Amino acid sequence: MTQNATRETARDEELAPAPDDAPPADGSAPRPRRFRRILKWSAAVLALLILAAGAAGYLYYRQLNDNIRKDPLNLGDSKVAEPTPNAAGQTPLNILLIGSDARDSEENQKLGGARETFGSTPLADVQMLVHLSADRSNMSVISMPRDTLLHIPKCTDPDDGTVYPASEGRRMTNESLGHGGPGCTVATWQELTGIHIDHFVMVDFAGVVAMADAVGGVPVCVDANIHSRDSQGHGSGLKLPKGTHPVKGEQALQWLRTRYGFEDGSDLARAKAQHMYMNSLARQLRENATLSSPNNLRRLAEEATRALTVDPGLDTVKKLYDLSTELRKVKPERITMTTMPNRYVGARVEPTEDAEKLFRLVREDIALDGRDARPKPPVVKPPADPAAADSAIAVQVRNGTRTDTLAPAQGRASAIAGELKEKGFTGATADTAGAYTEKRTVVRYPSADLEGDARRVAAVLGIPADAVKRSTDVSGVTLVVGADWREGTRYEAPEADDTTPESAQALNGADDKACMHVSPGFTW
C-alpha cells in the first residue's frame, strides 16, 4: 500500500461524507468500497496470527516441560544442612549428574548392548558432583568411580513405598540408583561427603547421543589409533585414528563408556576420558556459533528435555535455563575436573583420606584450582536466646567416629559425656544405642531457643562456632563426636590444607591439549 493511499483512507474515515466510489480530491481513480474491507480483514488476520503464534509458543513451552521427567531429590531419612551464605549473602550450588545405564527402551537397548541386562535394575554408572561457587567465579567437579565401595543409606521408593534398608556392609555406589531412583544416589552422596546437594540431573544412553548430535560434535583426542574391542568382544566399540576428532551420536556415547583401551583399562581411566569430554563440551557450548541458529537451539531444547530426569527444583524449561545461565558465568579456565581419590580393594575401590580432604574443600567452597584466597569465615551472630546455666543444659553425646575404612573408636560418647559432667554439665548423657558416621565433629540443636546452649557446649570443648548447626534431625542439643576427634577430651580442629590433592588428578577446563593414552593392545 502506498503512503498516499494510506493517508487517503484515513481521510475517508475521518470526513466520511463522500461515497465510497467518489473520486478523491486529487483526481486519482475512484477507490472501491472493498479496499476498506481488505484493510479490516488484514488487521483481523494479523491479530489472529499474533494470537496463534502466542498460543503455539505457549503450547510448545508446555510440550518441552512435559518432556522432562521428575523424581524426588532425596529418598533418604537424613538431611545435610545447607551451606552458610558468604558475606555477600551468596550460597554455593551443588548438582549431582547421574548417567544411567538403563536399557528400558528399544533405543537404549540398541545403544547399550549387553542383551542379558535388558529390563534389569538400572545402575548409576556415571556420577559427578558439580559445585558452583557462591560467587559464581569457579566450578569444581568430583567424579566417583562406579565401583566405589560405601554404605548405601535406607531409601524409600516414592512410587510404590518400597523400603530399601541401609546396606549392612559396603556396596558399589552404582547400585544406589536401584534403591528407589536417583534420590537414593543423592542420599548416598550426602552421607559419604557431608555436602548438601541442591539438585540432580540424570541422563540415559539415548540422551547422551541426542545432545551430542544437537551441539554438532565434541572434540576429543587420543595419542594413538584406538579400537575398544578385545578378543572376547568386550569394549565400547570406539574406533578413532590418532589425533583430535569431533565425536557425536553413538560415537560420543562410546567415548564416554570406553574402559577397554584407555590407559590401565579401569573405571578411573574412563572417568578421565569423561572429564576431557565434559571440558570440551563446555568450551563447545561457549564458543560454537552454530548454536545461534534458532533451529539448532530448538533441537537442543527438545533433545535435552526428552533426555533428562530431574528433581522438582529443575522441572521446567525456565528453571533449567536459569541453571544454565548460572553455569555459563564460569569461564573454562576456572573449571576443575577431579576424580575422588581412592585405593583398590580387590577389584573395587574405596575413598582415601585425600577424598575427605577434597570433600572438605567443596563443603567450604574453596576453589580447587588454587586461584582464590581462602574464604573468610562467616560472621557468627550471637544467639537470640543466651545459654542457660551449664548444669541446666541437657546434651546428648553420640559417637560418630565410624568411617568407610575405620570402625568406630570405642567409648567416645561416654568419654566426652564424662568430660562435660566434670565441667558442670550434669545433664550430659552418652547415646550408646547406635554407631553414627560424621566426618567432622558437630553440635546440633533443633530450635532457636537452644542455640545459646549449643554454643556454650561447643565453646567449653574447643569446638568452633561454625560447627554448631541448627537441625530438625535432633530433639535437643546433640554433640556428635566426629571422625576428626577419635581420641582426647579437648577438640583440636585440624590444620587447614587447602591445596587440591594430587591423587584427585585435577584437569583444568581450558586444557584443550589433553589426550587419552591408548593401551598398546587396543591400537591398530
Image (cartoon, rainbow, N blue to C red):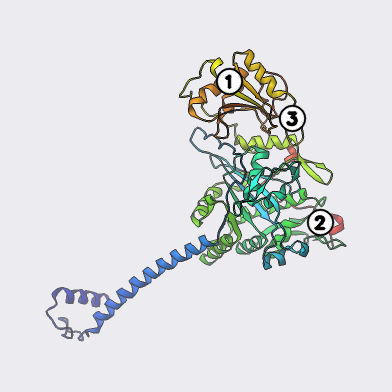
* Whole-number angstrom distance, CA of label 3 to CA of label 2: 39 Å
Nearer the camera: disc 1 or disc 2: 1
Q: For this view, does 416 lie left or right of residue 9?
A: right
Residue 212 in the figure: left or right of residue 45: right
Q: Earlier in the sequence, mark 3 or mark 2?
A: 2
If the image is split into quadrants, where does the N terminus sit? bottom left
Residue 18, image x, y percentages: 13, 81
Q: Which residue is mark 1?
A: 457
Q: CA distance from mark 1 to mark 2?
A: 54 Å
User: What residue does disc 3 label?
Assistant: 408
Looking at the image, is mark 1 or mark 3 earlier in the sequence? 3
Relative depth, front residue between 23 and 123: 123
Which numbered marker is on residue 167? none
Q: Are marks 1 and 3 in contact (CB under 8 Å)?
A: no
User: Which mark is in front, 3 or 2?
Assistant: 3
Which amino acid, by three-letter code, is at mark 3?
Answer: Pro
